[in-house]
Image (tube, helix red, strand yellow):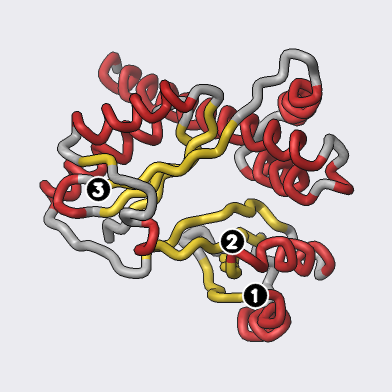
């Protein structure tokens, strides 16, 4: 019974850690959205998207409201979005999206993660050309016909449409049409669970299990960093 309890406890703490990281990430996104477009979600599409994403990870409403108020307060933190590029072991390309109030600290930490895991931090543009930046929307599947939905969305920058492992509909749009697609989905009354900008690799690298483990160690270290928002790579 003791061993089972320890496993359950470890699983529970890991889930809490992931949840805390998600809340922190969305809190920063809210701060940046409010700074750019104000605290009224009706007039701020970016903030509206953040609130959707908060609901998708079960972030309590009071925490969302507190993040919005904090972003307008005198003690607000100004975050800067910085993207870092580099290579993980075995030539896997990695892009790291960060939101930071101290770029000196962030670049030092990101470089440390790469170095400790046998990778290397590169210059801007060193791997960015390997990724396509797309808007990705996760939509609740309420029995929609994918072919019909595809035809309805084709004029709003649709690139791809499909389903994930949980049966949700995944819609991807070009980066420049992200706002138009978001508006189209709202007008059609579709329930958007999450809406994010993603970096999708144009080609992928396939490694054996041991090599992939080395790459994933770096990805995990980066994702645990407080300044890191998202990590993208081209490992298959």
The answer to whether the residue labelled 3 contacts the one labelled 2, judged by CB atoms less than 8 Å apart, is: no
Percent from the top left, x then y, of residue 79?
60, 29
Q: Which residue is drawn at 76% across and 35% down?
A: 34
Mark 1 falls on what kind of element? loop
- The numbered disc on residue 87 is 3
* Label 3, residues with CA under 10 Å away: few <14, some 14-19, many ≥20: many
Percent from the top left, x then y, of residue 147?
62, 85
Q: Residue at x 15, y 58 (%)?
A: 207
Closer to us: mark 3 or mark 2?
3
Q: In which quarter of the image is the N terminus?
A: top left
Q: Residue 64: name its quadrant.
A: top right
Q: Residue 91: name its quadrant.
A: bottom left
Quickly name the residue at label 2.
Answer: 135
Mark 2 falls on what kind of element? strand
Q: Which residue is drawn at 17% across and 46% down?
A: 89
Percent from the top left, x then y, of residue 181?
71, 67
The answer to whether the residue labelled 2 contacts the one labelled 1, judged by CB atoms less than 8 Å apart, is: yes
Q: Residue 35: name its quadrant.
A: top right
Q: In front here: 203 or 1?
A: 203
How far, Cα to Cα, is label 3 from label 2? 24 Å
Percent from the top left, x then y, of residue 231?
41, 44
Q: Residue at x 65, y 26 (%)?
A: 78
Q: Quadrant of the C terminus?
A: bottom left
How far, Cα to Cα, is label 2 from label 1? 10 Å
- The numbered disc on residue 157 is 1
Q: In front here: 125 or 5?
A: 125
Vertical comparison of 5 with 185: above or below: above
The mark that comes first in sequence, 3 or 2, is 3
The mark that comes first in sequence, 3 or 1, is 3
Q: In this view, does 64 lie to the left or right of 230?
A: right
* Label 1, residues with CA under 10 Å away: few <14, some 14-19, many ≥20: some
């Amino acid at each position: 019974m003791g061993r089972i309890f320890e496993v359950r406890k470890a699983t529970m703490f890991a889930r809490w850690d992931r949840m805390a990281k998600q809340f922190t990430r969305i809190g920063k996104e809210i701060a940046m959205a409010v700074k750019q477009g104000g605290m009224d979600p009706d007039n701020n599409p970016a903030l509206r998207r953040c609130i959707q994403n908060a609901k998708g990870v079960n972030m309590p409403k009071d925490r969302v409201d507190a993040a919005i108020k904090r972003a307008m307060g005198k003690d607000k933190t100004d975050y800067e979005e910085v993207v870092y590029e580099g290579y993980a072991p075995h030539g896997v390309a990695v892009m790291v999206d960060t939101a930071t109030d101290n770029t000196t600290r962030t670049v030092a930490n990101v470089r440390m993660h790469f170095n400790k895991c046998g990778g290397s931090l590169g210059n801007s543009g060193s791997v960015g050309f390997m990724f396509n930046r797309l808007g990705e929307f996760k939509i609740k599947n309420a029995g929609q016909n994918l072919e019909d939905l595809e035809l309805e969305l084709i004029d709003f920058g649709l690139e791809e449409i499909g389903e994930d492992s949980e049966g949700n509909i995944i819609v991807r749009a070009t980066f420049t049409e992200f706002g138009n697609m978001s508006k189209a989905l709202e007008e059609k009354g579709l329930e958007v669970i999450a809406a994010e900008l993603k970096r999708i690799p144009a080609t992928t690298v396939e490694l054996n299990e041991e090599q992939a483990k080395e790459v994933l160690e770096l990805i995990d270290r980066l994702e645990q960093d407080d300044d890191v928002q998202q990590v993208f790579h081209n490992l298959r």
